[in-house]
Image (spheres, helix red, strand yellow):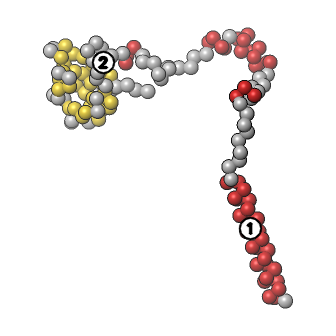
Amino acid sequence: MIVDNKKKIELLITGIGIIILIFLIMNHIPKPKANKSISNIEPYPTSEVAILATSEVGYEDDVKWGRDPFLLDSANVKEQGMEDLILNGVVSDKLSPYAIINNDVVKIGDKVSGMTVIEINEKNVVLDENGQRRTLELNLY
């Protein structure tokens, strides 16, 4: 009798394990995608109250989304003669700062396109070209 109960428990546990295994396999099989074209998809219904509220208050024209990351602002516009220089990064160390210009590591006193690096700051590098100072800005996003 003890042997029969033991076999029944073993069969029950095995059956539960098989059911769990089948459930896990079914959840990991990718489901086929619907073959709808974009034109057949209906837009999400918008409540008329929301449409009226935005048009009455004028949110559509007043929404400010912030800076467009794909447009250069006036601070990042390159000076004439520096179009070919890109400040890729700055290693800010008080004793010996380094800058990465056109993927080359430079330090104060090095020459870049005929200009001398005279200052390296956290967000820019100052270059000297025949007594004229030019600033190369780090493009922050």
Q: Quadrant of the N terminus?
A: bottom right
Q: Residue 51's mark?
A: none
Q: Looking at the image, is mark 1 or mark 2 earlier in the sequence?
A: 1
Picture coordinates of residue 29 (x, y %)? 68, 53
Q: Which residue does the image show at 26% across and 36% down from the upper left?
A: 93
- Mark 1 to mark 2: distance in Å? 67 Å
Q: Which residue does the image show at 42% across and 16% down from the upper left?
A: 73
Q: Residues within 10 Å of mark 1 (few under 14, many from 20)?
A: few
Give the labeled residue for mark 2: 83
SS for dot 2: loop
Q: Quadrant of the C terminus?
A: top left
Closer-to-camera residue (19/31): 31
Q: Which residue does the image show at 82% across and 83% down from the upper left?
A: 5
Quadrant assignment, res 18: bottom right
Closer-to-camera residue (32/133): 32
Q: Are marks 1 and 2 in contact (CB under 8 Å)?
A: no
Say if residue 118 shows up in the picture. Answer: no
Q: Which residue does the image show at 50% across and 20% down from the upper left?
A: 68
Q: Residue 18's mark?
A: 1
